[in-house]
Image: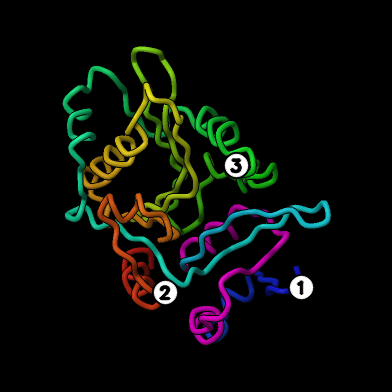
């Protein structure tokens, strides 16, 4: 862990450190901490970090990342493929829900991505965040579920969080089975439509390096441009 900087609540409360080192230093993206605390996690999220976890020498650390680039979805840019459009018209085949079964979603992530970064301490923190209310930040942990009605199978899902009117994705999964072709894209499309319908400002999709995000209509913003957009809505 010596390659990256340890970060504390005091660091992010110091405006000089936050603006002139964390935001301005384009050579550093990841920081680390062993503080698994609800308020600290939410405070990190509000200023633009997306936190994952990592085990080093048997100890689990939180890795807040101030990304160099972000994939951002403005709902007017949503692109719906012909195959997904066809599925949308067959809505008797599936059910879409928000925060109906976070346990099933985390189980799906662990099953279909066994090497994922959602380790035990991180998952424990997420479950605490489900019911937690920050003193002044409007934060809510969300899960998104797409279930096949014919088989009663959770086919795709993700976990993320809302801060004010923004939504940020953390992780998700989709079953790779011919029977469920394009259900992963369908889940993201339905989520996008849900966010727009419920007056969210935009969707922070995180890393921009996955083509499916761009295919859906996301644009890539550098850190500076993202923070301008982000801080207007969460501050």
| 3D distance between C-alphas at marks 3 and 2 | 29 Å
Q: Do the residues labelled 3 and 2 touch (CB within 8 Å)?
A: no
Label 3 sits on residue: 128
| 3D distance between C-alphas at marks 3 and 1 | 29 Å
Provide the secondary structure element on which disc 3 rests: helix
Label 3 vs 2, first from the N-terminus? 3
Which residue is nearer to you in this view: 231 or 70?
70
**Category of crowding for the residue at label 1, using alpha-carbon neighbours closer than 10 angstroms: few (below 14), some (14–19), many (at least 20):** few
Q: Quadrant of residue 73?
A: bottom left
Farthest-out residue, front: 178
Q: Say above or below: 114 vs 153.
A: below
Left or right side of 196 for 53: right
Identify which residue is drawn at 34% across, 75% down. 225
Provide the secondary structure element on which disc 1 rests: loop
Label 1 sits on residue: 2
Left or right side of 136 for 9: right
**Category of crowding for the residue at label 2, using alpha-carbon neighbours closer than 10 angstroms: few (below 14), some (14–19), many (at least 20):** some
Where does the magenta region start and end? 18-47
Identify which residue is drawn at 44% across, 19% down. 153
| Residue 5, position as x, y percentages in the image | 68, 74
Farthest-out residue, top: 150
Label 3 vs 1, first from the N-terminus? 1
Which residue is nearer to you in this view: 174 or 92?
174
Quadrant location of the N terminus? bottom right
């Amino acid at each position: 862990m010596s390659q990256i900087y340890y970060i504390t609540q005091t660091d992010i409360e110091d405006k000089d450190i936050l603006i002139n080192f964390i935001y301005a230093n384009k050579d550093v993206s990841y920081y680390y901490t062993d503080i698994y605390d609800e308020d600290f996690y939410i405070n990190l999220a509000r200023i633009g970090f997306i936190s994952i976890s990592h085990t080093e020498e048997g100890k689990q650390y939180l890795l807040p990342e101030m990304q160099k680039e972000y994939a951002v979805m403005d709902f007017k840019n949503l692109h719906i493929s012909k195959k997904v459009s066809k599925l949308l018209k067959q809505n008797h085949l599936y059910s879409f829900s928000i925060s109906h079964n976070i346990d099933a979603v985390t189980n799906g992530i662990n099953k279909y991505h066994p090497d994922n970064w959602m380790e035990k301490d991180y998952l424990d923190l997420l479950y605490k965040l489900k019911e937690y209310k920050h003193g002044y930040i409007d934060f809510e942990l969300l899960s998104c579920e797409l279930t096949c009605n014919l088989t009663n199978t959770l086919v795709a899902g993700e976990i993320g969080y809302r801060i004010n009117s923004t939504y940020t994705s953390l992780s998700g999964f989709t079953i790779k089975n011919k029977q469920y072709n394009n259900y992963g894209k369908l889940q993201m499309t339905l989520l996008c439509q849900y966010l727009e319908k419920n007056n969210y400002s935009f969707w922070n999709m995180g890393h921009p390096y996955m083509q499916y995000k761009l295919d859906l209509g996301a644009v890539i913003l550098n850190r500076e441009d993202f923070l301008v957009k982000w801080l207007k809505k969460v501050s």
